Amino acid sequence: MHISSLFPFFLSAVQRGRMPPTQPNPGQYALTNGDPLNGHCYLSGYISLLLRAEPYPTSRYGSQCMQPNNIMGIENICELAARLLFSAVEWARNIPFFPDLQITDQVSLLRLTWSELFVLNAAQCSMPLHVAPLLAAAGLHASPMSADRVVAFMDHIRIFQEQVEKLKTLHVDSAEYSCLKAIVLFTSDACGLSDAAHIESLQEKSQCALEEYVRSQYPNQPSRFGKLLLRLPSLRTVSSSVIEQLFFVRLTRSILQRFPIHPELAVNFPERRQPLLPIMSQLGVTKGVSMRQYADEPVPLR
């Protein structure tokens, strides 16, 4: 079973959401999550809500994530990857407009864009991408490949590494990452959308928010907005099947073992819905994450 088949399950797990009922002032919102955003303390209301939807700040992904030269073990790599994937789903479920879409549209959008969101999250947290542990995580040492397949697989890993490094060299801040993820997520290219024009308008709104933010906060970098947008098409060059083989074979196996109901049916069984973090805990992917902050009760703004 492919990871994309599990998105109905992931969405049902966060259906109740984690956002408090009160919304911030639609004008301005002061950041208090420890990310100085290059000294910019106030953001537009839309970008503020995108940031506020992040399940946990970058610092909570783990200390290994912040040390690019540190070679992580297989278990840590898979755990970190699972957190990055889960956080993308939970973020999407809590940003403006996405929860209002039909559940079939939500699933279609995530199925098409999950790998791009994963690459953006990996770049944002400076995920270490050393080749040997990645090959071990994919189980290639245990199941030998032909020389041609190994070369092709290594080439896919190189493309993944290059995309992450190119984003890191732009020094993208948290607000820009949130806008980029929204632009990626709200794509009318997904199959079977009930209202593709509405999705496209949400993408345009996200793009305009990014353009306004970059123009006001980086006035001395007139080409910055264009450089950020030019990074997005190349994200699709990263093979989703390779990302899945590298990081998520164990995850899909664990979910199917612990939750035997077919993931495609999960959305039809609301009584089975559970908060996402407890599910992650059962799957062993919440090490270092505060369960108290992400319980069902509303949480304060970061």
Image (spheres, grey):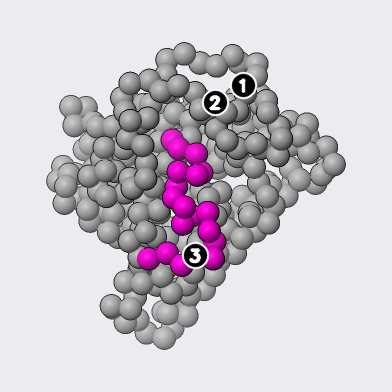
Give the residue pinned by disc 2: 49
Question: Does 222 sit left or right of 119 as displayed?
Answer: right
Q: Is residue 298 left or right of residue 165?
A: left
Disc 3: which residue: 70
Residue 179 is a magenta residue: no
Amino acid tagged 3: Asn
Cα–Cα gap, marks 2 and 1: 9 Å
Residue 39 x/y as whole percent: 71, 35
Identify which residue is drawn at 28% across, 78% down: 143
Q: Position of residue 13 (x, y in %)?
A: 29, 34
The amino acid type of the residue labelled 1 equals Tyr
Q: Which label sits in the foreground, 2 or 1?
A: 1
Q: Quadrant of residue 31?
A: top right
Sequence-earlier tag: 1 or 3: 1
Asked whether 254 or 231 is in front, the reply is 254
In the shown orientation, is residue 283 left or right of residue 130?
A: left
Residue 97 visible, this angle: yes
Find numbered disc 2 in the image and state the secondary structure of the residue it sits on. helix
Q: CA distance from mark 3 to mark 2?
A: 33 Å
- Disc 3 and disc 2 in contact, CB within 8 angstroms: no
Q: Secondary structure at mark 3?
A: loop
The correct choice, above or below, for 215 with respect to 2 in the image is above
Taking the image as shown, residue 102 lies to the left or right of residue 176, namely left
